[in-house]
Amino acid sequence: MAKPKVGFFSFTSCEGCQLIVLSMADRLLELIDAVEIVNFREASTYKGEDYEIAIIEGAISTVREIDEVTKIREKAKIVIALGACSCTGGVNVIKNFKNQNIIRKEVYGEQAYEFDTILAQPIDAIIHVDYYSRGCPPSRDGDELYEIVTAIIQGRKPYIINAPVCVQCKMQDNVCVFHKERPIACLGPVTRAGCDAACPSVGNACEGCRGLVDDPNLTAHEKTLRENGLETPEILKYYRMYNGLMEVQK
Amino acid sequence: MHMQSFESNVHHITRVEGHGNLVVDVKNGELKEVRLDIVEAPRFFEPMLAGRRFPEAPHLTARICGICSIGHTLASIRAIEDALAIQPTEQTIILRKIALEAEILQSHVLHYYFLAAPDFVGAPSVFPLAISHPEVVKRAVKLKKISDDICREVAGRHPQPVSIQIDGFTNLPKVADIQVLVDRMKEALSQDIPPTLDFFASVSIPAFERKTDYVALTSPDEYAFYSGTLISSETGEISARDYRNKVKEEVVLHSTAKHAKGPFNPYMVGALARFNHNSEQLMPQAKAAAEKLKLKAPNYNPFNITIAQVVESVHNLERMVMLFEGLIKTGLKDERAERGVQGWSTKLPPIKKSWGVGAVEVPRGVLFHEYKIDDDGLIANANCVIPTNQNLANIEEDLRAYVPQILDKSKEEIIFLLEMLVRAYDPCISCSSHLLEVEFVS
Amino acid sequence: MFHKTAVIGIGNLLLKDEGLGIHAVRLLKNRFPEINAEIIDAGTPGFGLYDLFEKYEKVVVVDAINMGKHFGSIGKFTPDQVVALTKSFSLHDLGLAEVIKLGQNLGQDFSHVIIWGIQPKEIAFGEDLTSEVKNSLIELVELIVDHVKASPTILRPEASDGSPSPSKMERALETA
């Protein structure tokens, strides 16, 4: 395959995912060598329209963004969703649970309806996505994205783990945070691994930013949370930090 | 050429963080309109915070911005600690200061090398520079890597820190690892900073001056980033808690980001504002860098924000070396058993209804977080004022003043210079579209 | 008193429409308390569901069932039909389909079990039902009431020594 042309795009987000790409240091230089970056608004004036691979960060939360992401899908052969916002909607989904009229008024006052804003959703609510590079920020400092792009160039399937975070957490020899002296609630048991349990490994809880693992054991997890003193409103808040929208896996 | 007329809408200015459109309308040699339309989708962070447990605020607000995620985390934590009267330990404060300086360094390097430098060498981006100026790019990548590695060592990850928490850290760096970082920083100061200074001393900065109100944090102890009082060159010094006397956010129809102004005029925050107030407190090599780059306080050319960032990044390296060496000497104490309030604690400590403000300098200027916390530990109300919001009105004033001075140039040149002016401010547009609490001026 | 018929609602109350089975039996208990059946709010019972199937002579299960129909549609299914509708089996959770399949593998036919379901619209974190599902609840409850009335079982006192229920023994004798 000739050097594939890549475009980076961002929607409703903190742009941390693009930052991860720019922070990939040596691997960034390798990447620049292996692909042709034709569109990367944050880093480049040149805006090419001839991209084959579109790497998209950010959730969709305006009508304008629906149009833009649809156009990108029409042009690109392959779409990679980069980061929690584009994979699952990310933290933006929290606002969906508020009364939209009230928050518009709170933020913009009398001019509330001049602003284009809709419920936040992941990009696969609008377009078909070929690969997901998950995490907030993308896990392992962009390793997963690197693996996906490399796999595409090599014409193979990328290796993406399908197990809960607990598996990788134990591989790091961590003591389970539920068993710390001051226990903390953790979403690791129902979250997809692939981040090497970055947060529990430094004594913090998993917040579920990579989205739910396939077939999550929500029943047992809920029981564990309740045993640790959490009640329904708090349980829902925790799950909804990154996982407010779920796919129906039936 | 003076009689030219054109309209221009630069859709999505490039090489800035976030989405903004630059609109210019010139008729018969006269500027009719110039605006920076912020078209970033509104994020609604403040309503999202309402009703959530206070320890979640730092992790949530870190997602306002990737580049200043440590900055938001610290402002959030300081607001909470202010509200709950928590005084963290000396060691915690030192580690936080290091993390903040590292993030500022990372952001400045990103801005002056990746985003602004291409303008100075006539390139569309940093990527072709990898071929035409490989040394420049290697150096940029190396400096960014050092700052990222420090952030990772101290804060657990960058962007989006994980080990910074209220009243402490969940994980401590090891002395041996810190020593390696100190060595790398010293090497950077001697090997990579001098050619960086040479590069920026050789570029030509557009000549433009517009004196404005410069606002920054200031502290008697050091060049202020982590804490301080709020100082304005026009209206004097106030406590950070009283920031609302100085900053009012107003809704502007062409912008999803509100404009924050002082009660009198638009003002500037950021590296140049900090430099103008606090340049005497820079570390020695940073002072020498300022001299080499011919930057003297007070300076009124906004294009020099980029230069002030170069000077600050030298300071960041020197400061971090100093603070780390202090920690290596005293050793690191594991305070985790007694200190720390975690977001995901299954039991919250008892709290009283309270209110607090955290003000922190992030790469682009002063950042304010203000929270009201209720008896159940839930956030009743949150307000975040972002540096870029505070600069937006000033950017437009600068554009208005600058256009008439360059009308004799071609349309392409004019647009290029205006974009460069916007870029100089290093706007963080995603941050600025966050919002709450409307107090607006009709 | 030992009912020979049970109406069992299953589901997860934290996953919106996934909890409709629970909402349904609660509504049933509220509106039709005199119904000739044991009403059980089983939550997510796992293997306990198997025990419940064995304990009663007739079982009505109420659950969210993905039938591929429009949201709020009501359907009645045999155990085989439920298994056929299930796209994948959980590796760690014993839901309705898994329990039926397990029973079948153990030689049970569960022909005394009938399943009533509603097509869910949204399975996501939350406590409320979507309006499409909520609007079908009362109709579903009334259908179940009619169904139970149409095939009554006789109320019997429980065996005081905890011995297997008479109906099981009767069945065992029948097959002996």
Image (cartoon, rainbow, N blue to C red):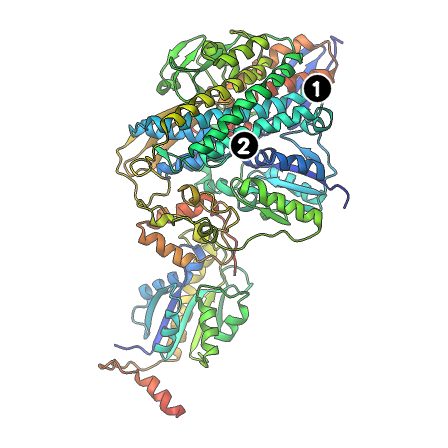
When the figure is inspected, residue B245 is found, relative to residue A77, above or below; the finding is above
Residue drawn at point x = 50 percent, y = 55 percent: A163
Front one among B359 and B142: B142
Whole-percent x, y for residue B107 in the image: 54, 26
Residue B234 falls in image quadrant: top left
When the figure is inspected, residue A193 is found, relative to residue C101, above or below; the finding is above
Q: Secondary structure at mark 2?
A: loop
Front one among A190 and A198: A198
Q: Secondary structure at mark 1?
A: helix
What type is the residue that disc 2 sits on? Phe
Which residue is labeled 2 in the image? Answer: A115
Determine whether, in the image, residue B353 is placed left or right of residue B78: left
Quadrant where the image shows the N terminus of chain B: top right
Residue A70 falls in image quadrant: top right
Which residue is labeled 1 in the image? Answer: B121
What chain letter is assigned to the residue under label 2?
A
Front one among B71 and B435: B71
